[in-house]
Amino acid sequence: MNARLRVLLVDDELAMRESLAAWLRQDGHQVTKAAGGLEALAELERQEFDLALVDIKMPGMDGLELLRRVKDAHPDTLVVIITAYGSIESAVEAMKAGASDYLLKPFDPEHLMLLLEKMARQRDLLRENSALRQRLNEGECIGFAGLVGQSPAMRAVFGQIEDAAPALAPVLITGETGTGKEMVARAIHNQGPRAFAPFVTINCGAVTETLLESELFGHERGAFTGAVKARRGRLEMADGGTLFLDEVGEISQKMQVALLRVLEEKRFQRVGGNQYLASDFRLISATNRDLPALIQQGRFRQDFFYRINVLAIAIPPLRERVEDIIPLAEHFLAYFAAQTGKANLVLDSRAQRALRAYPWPGNVRELRNVIERAVIVAQGSSVGLDKLTFLSPLPEADSSAMTLAEVELAHIRRVLKSQGGSVSATAGVLGIDRSTLSRKLKKAGLEPS
Amino acid sequence: MVPLGRVSATAAAVVAANLQALLGLNTLVVRPWPEPSPCLVPTRGQYDASLILRELAPEGESGALRLGLINHDLCLSFLTFVFGEAQLGGRAAVVSLHRLQDLDDGSRAPQALFLERLAKVGLHETAHVLGLPHCRAPGCLMRFSGGLAELDRLGLEFCPACQGRLAVGRARIRRGDVRAPFGSGPGLG
């Protein structure tokens, strides 16, 4: 449990406000003070708080009214009402209105400490719930997070995920677009000790350098034009959890230097801030670029590469693991069928053959999209070839000038490669006897390794 | 060190010795100051610790660290009682002997136990002045104690992380950067 809370202290009495704020700071909390309800609401618009400590009796907007407005606009901010002896009815009313607890002035020191610990636990639970809700919304299951595959190449990837999960070392995931790099990153997170902490993602290729800096490091109010409110960056949000840098190959050298410093010093400053903040996150990066080649060209820093590439996982493209295509297609078919209320859909044999023959330039993401569209237009219980819409032409169209034997041989070569040269495995995938395959290979002058 | 009113010379000497031995601070016990009667809260029969800190180290004034010792019970406007109180990274702290002399059954604590408690609270509050916040490490002297039972469970030592922070705090004192900040901080309880 991270015992440190971001506290908004609301009390109209200056002496009380100052001394309680000092006490909370010395207990390690980050405290912002407000002298009344309106000032408190303005602070809540500027920044996020874990806990609001609110005096019930204030001129103008009283504590109960403030409580209702906080719960309405900032439901994740916990509110504790401070009240004097003799006004217990107000405390009960506050609890009914959504207060997490109340304190009777003056507080017993031990009671105050226990209450702050309880609020830190509640804050952690809220964060965990939010992370779980996000995962459920994305239609994932906890565990291997929807990863499907039975090819030797993917089994090797699963093994690497299991090895990487308990470690805290940075991981670099490489693979073509659509191979499921983020799914692998989530699987590492979900299998590891930080599974119930936030998994925070940022696509480094989708934003400008300035925006990326602000997104990663956060900013203070007034740091730049438009920064009307202080904002936590992804580094802060990932505290205790995992930070996933997608498309890390797109980061500028300047940002690489800044991130390298964070990774080495474990602390950073918000844009426009002068206070050092600490964040304990595990870094997972992903790219479809050839980073060693970029280093050779002087476009990627070698020191940053070594720092993020402690553990490396390479995801093979779908065309190199043909035997995963149908299990993946069936997985997506069942998922989208359930989403659309079409139970028990199956792929007919022609559809299956077409799926296996297609080169999948968009990899698993493309397969998922093809199946999603097919499910939407499917009628009855079977999905046929006519329901599949591919981005690229089917290989049959390209191979119209080839003989049947040439097409067969090209397919055998492809499957053999995906099976690491294993004749038995290749025969299994092709649905023919091992002896038949051996005969065809011999006839074509191919000697399996 | 500043006795506020009548305070046992043995008690002052024990705290001074511990500050010297564990924190490496040269400690001088000065002649007692009068009891800080303006800091008395008549309705509670206790002294307001935050007001005493301002008496010990007026805002903006610089000079040596000051640790007040007082026989009376201390409180804060929002806390029922405190064993002590300090300015975080500031200049002043105060420790009350009042509750440290008791046992749970209401009888007097043995002198050795009383002096050990007093040393713990004196070190804890002075470490706050050196800039140390509360610590969650079990047994560390900077861990918060809400009562005597918890205080008695603490060792007379700082965890490694707090020892590191103490070194930084002592460096600040050596630089002579000692001023009383506005407001005051928490005590051991």
Image (cartoon, coloured by chain):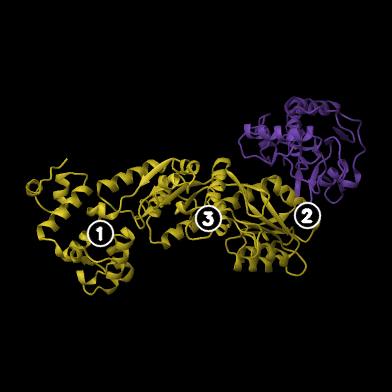
Chain colours: A yellow, B purple
Residues tagged by mark 2 and mark 3 found on one chain of the structure: yes
**Residue at point 47%, 58% (across, down):** A205
Q: Chain of mark 2?
A: A
Of callouts 1 and 2, the N-terminal one = 2
Q: Which residue occupies the foreground of this view, A218 or A19? A: A218
Q: Which residue is mark 1?
A: A359
The image quadrant of residue B168 is top right
**Which label belongs to residue A127?**
3
Q: Which residue is mark 2?
A: A16
Is residue B46 found left or right of A51 in the rendered image? right
What is the C-alpha distance between the residues marked 1 and 3?
Answer: 42 Å
Q: Chain of mark 3?
A: A
Q: Chain of mark 1?
A: A
Residue B102 showing in the rendered view: no
Count numbered badges in the picture: 3
Q: Is residue A139 above or below residue B149?
A: below
User: Which amino acid type is shown beneath numbered disc 3?
Assistant: Arg
Does dot 1 land on a helix, a strand or a loop? Answer: loop
Circles 2 and 3: CB distance less than 8 Å? no
What is the C-alpha distance between the residues marked 1 and 2?
Answer: 70 Å
Please identify, in this view, whether the residue under mark 1 or under mark 2 is nearer the observer.
Answer: 1
